[in-house]
Image: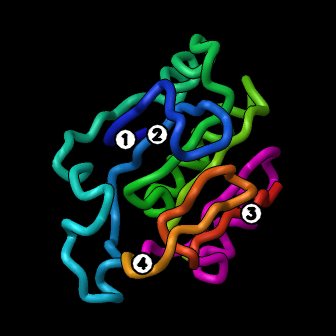
Amino acid sequence: MRVKQIKDEDFLNYKKTSMLIATCFCDWKCLKEKNLDLSICHNSQLPLENIIDISSDKIITRYLSNSISKAVVIAGLEPMLQFDEILEFIQEFRKESQDDIAIYTGYYENEIADKINLLKQYKNIIVKFGRFTPDNNKRYDDVLGVWLASDNQYAIKIS
């Protein structure tokens, strides 16, 4: 799996302590739609980091060896641009753990319905939908148990 970053313990993106996996690519849809500069994105430094190629097995072993993290968050840049890799990771992870997996996407449900249908076959999958809009208010999301950057963003436990 290609990643930009792995944090073994993240406390900001989910109600449970999580391993955060940052993906590699983004189409900057949220910024392009509003004609905004990349510097506005809270992930603007991620593209500058090197891509790390790490097997799903190594990520899973790393997760399981950490007794503090109780979930996985797959987030920025845009995970859905690496969907095959994400799906393979989830398939392998489910062989070892049924812990929650939250996927942060900037897409809306109707834009990735085919991918959501594939994800529904796995237990405890949560998807955060919606593009970052800098002028919107923050919003507390009960599913994730955290504040989201824009009030047009929301999470659904899809399975």
Q: Which mark is residue 21?
A: 2
Task: Single out the mark in the foreground, 1 or 4.
Answer: 4
Residues packed near mark 4 inside 10 Å, few (<14), some (14 to 19) or many (20 plus): many
Magenta part of the protein: which range? 108-132
The secondary structure type at the circle numbered 1 is: strand
47 sits left or right of 25 in the view:
left
Label 2 is placed on what type of residue? Answer: Ile
Q: CA distance from mark 3 to mark 1?
A: 24 Å
Query: Which tag, 4 or 2, sits closer to the chain's start?
Result: 2
Tag 3 residue: 156
Tag 1 residue: 3
Q: Which mark is residue 133?
A: 4
Q: Residue at x 72, y 40 (%)?
A: 100
Label 4 is placed on what type of residue? Answer: Thr
Q: Where does residue 24 sit, x and y in percent of width and height?
A: 33, 51
Marks 1 and 4 close (CB-CB < 8 Å)? no
